[in-house]
Amino acid sequence: MNKVILIGRSESGKTTLTQALTNKDIRYEKTQIVQRGEFIIDTPGEYIQTRNFGGALAVYAYESDIVGLLISADEPFSLFPPNITSMANRLVIGIVTGIDKKDARPDRAENWLRLAGCKKIFKVSSATGEGIDELREFLSTFDCKEYYKTQKIQQSNYK
């Protein structure tokens, strides 16, 4: 399974998504520190929301195979600037969470992720399970080594 780092603001659903992807009971947990699991790196939202912590995300992203940018379907704005994915030397995917919420606008969140540079976007609900199997399948079958080779991205992990 490819290792993915989940990056998004506080309450965007990173920890809940981690629980859903690892078949754990869904319960609220506030992530206070970077949680390193078997194939998921769950980061506190404050790391993307606070300028001084941005460097830590870059370091942890280097330990991953794939970067996942999360935006909840009911968020009023995006923290990710246009074309931010060009700064990463990893595949960056977009993940729209909370698509089952009452005030969800998943198409708006998807558009923000596309503007950020994400080409592959998953729409998921950790509560209902919608889209979780598709994301899990992608993470387990995507050939990062071949992708980085065809993209001519120099990766110390994928030589």
Image (cartoon, grey):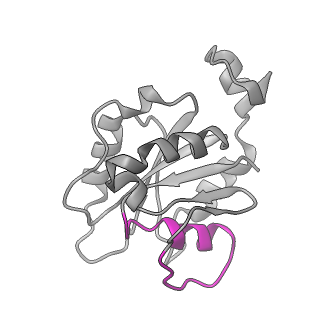
Residue plotted at (28% across, 44% down) = 112
Is residue 151 left or right of 58 when viewed as pictured?
A: right
Residue plotted at (50% across, 46% down) = 57
Residue plotted at (42% across, 55% down) = 47
Give the vertical position of 54 relative to 29 (above or below).
Answer: above
The spot of residue 28 in percent (x, y) is 48, 84
Quadrant for the C terminus, please. Answer: top right
The spot of residue 88 in percent (x, y) is 50, 31
Q: Which of the 4 quarters of the picture holds residue 144?
A: top right
Task: Decide which of 156, 94 is in the foreground and name it.
Answer: 156
The spot of residue 128 in percent (x, y) is 50, 77
Residue range (magenta): 10-30
Residue 27 covered by magenta stretch: yes
Q: Which of the 4 quarters of the picture holds residue 8?
A: bottom left
Residue that lies at the very extreme toward the right in this rendered image: 159
Residue that lies at the very extreme toward the front in this rendered image: 52
Task: Decide which of 145, 29 is in the foreground and name it.
Answer: 29
Task: Decide which of 20, 105 is in the foreground and name it.
Answer: 20
Residue plotted at (37% across, 48% down) = 52
**How would you classify the magenta stretch by its main secondary structure?**
loop
Give the vertical position of 72 relative to 138 (above or below).
Answer: below
Residue that lies at the very extreme toward the top in this rendered image: 152
Task: Decide which of 92, 109 is in the foreground and name it.
Answer: 92
Q: Which of the 4 quarters of the picture holds residue 119?
A: top left
